Amino acid sequence: MDFRRIEMIFIAIFIALDIYLFMSLSGSQTTNSASITNRSQTSQILKDLKDDQITVKRLSNQKRESYYLASRQADQTGLATASAKLTGQTVSFDKTRLTLTSVLDKPLSYKKGKATAVINTFLKGNNNVYQADQYRYSKALSNNQQAVYVQKVPGGQMMDEHGQLIFTLDNGQISQYTQTYINKVQILREKEMTKISAQGAVVDLYTDNEIPNNSKILWVQLGYSALLDANSSTVYVPAWQIAIENKSTKSVVVKRINAFTGALMKNRSEVSS
């Protein structure tokens, strides 16, 4: 293994990350309202939320320690290799999306409210799921149509499509799942304190007109999301995931706030209730 080359790759990632952070922090001086909001202003904004028929439960204003993480694209071969070793299923692998899709030879049956128990038993079986012990169930991301498990990483868990295990639920039957997995996750920097709390993330979204009137904040969770690609590697940062439900249509959108900088992250995913 060319350790010198790997070292140069991560130096390049550091440089790209530093440039990105400088630009984000410079821009946030004028656009990130959370950085200039004091306690009295926050209290007023929380009152404004209620006036706009935006329902939100009491949120923590505590900040947390997290890492900058990275993975090299060249290392993402484990899932493809493992697909040939899985048993009792027909497996395909999308090299572009780095996604494994499996159709079970014998569907799993479950009773109402018991899907996760059946899946957890399945995960414990040999050669059923690659790196099964590296995932944990996410109640927030799951619904009546799918059970979502997220990959555990240093300092927390993934909360985007790069590290998820998704089982399709269909009238008491589970016949397929999709899987993504981040191999060889690297810590880029020592653990540091986030700039934004759960409460701050919601306040920031509201002041930037990202939360419509007559809506409800279903949940707010911290998890890692992809920030940027640099030199054939991907950098991940802790991000507050905020699920917002339209009270009229019941549609749900999940928005993400970079917990280190307070910037709105562009990619958004929609989930059904």
Image: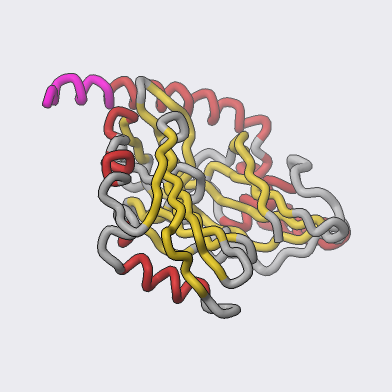
Q: Look at 27% across and 33% down and name the residue there.
A: 75
Q: Position of residue 194 (x, y in %)?
A: 47, 48
Across the whole image, how many numbered discs are drawn on residues? 0
Q: Between 173 and 29, which is closer to the camera in this rendering?
A: 173
Q: Which quarter of the picture shows residue 135?
A: bottom left
Q: Between 172 and 237, which is closer to the camera in this rendering?
A: 172
Q: Look at 52% across and 73% down and name the residue there.
A: 115
Dominant secondary-structure state across the stretch colored magenta: helix
* Residue 81 visible somewhere in the drawing: yes
Say how the picture is coloured. Answer: secondary structure
Q: Per the image, is 177 magenta?
A: no
Q: Quadrant of the C terminus?
A: bottom right
Q: Between 230 and 273, which is closer to the camera in this rendering?
A: 273
Q: Quadrant of the N terminus?
A: top left
Q: Per the image, is 7 magenta?
A: yes
Q: Position of residue 62 (x, y in %)?
A: 52, 60
Q: Position of residue 122 (x, y in %)?
A: 37, 68
Range of magenta residues = 1-10
* Residue 38 visible somewhere in the drawing: no
Q: Look at 66% across and 55% down and name the residue there.
A: 243
Give the answer, above or below, for where 57 lies relative to 187: below
Q: Position of residue 118 (x, y in %)?
A: 44, 74
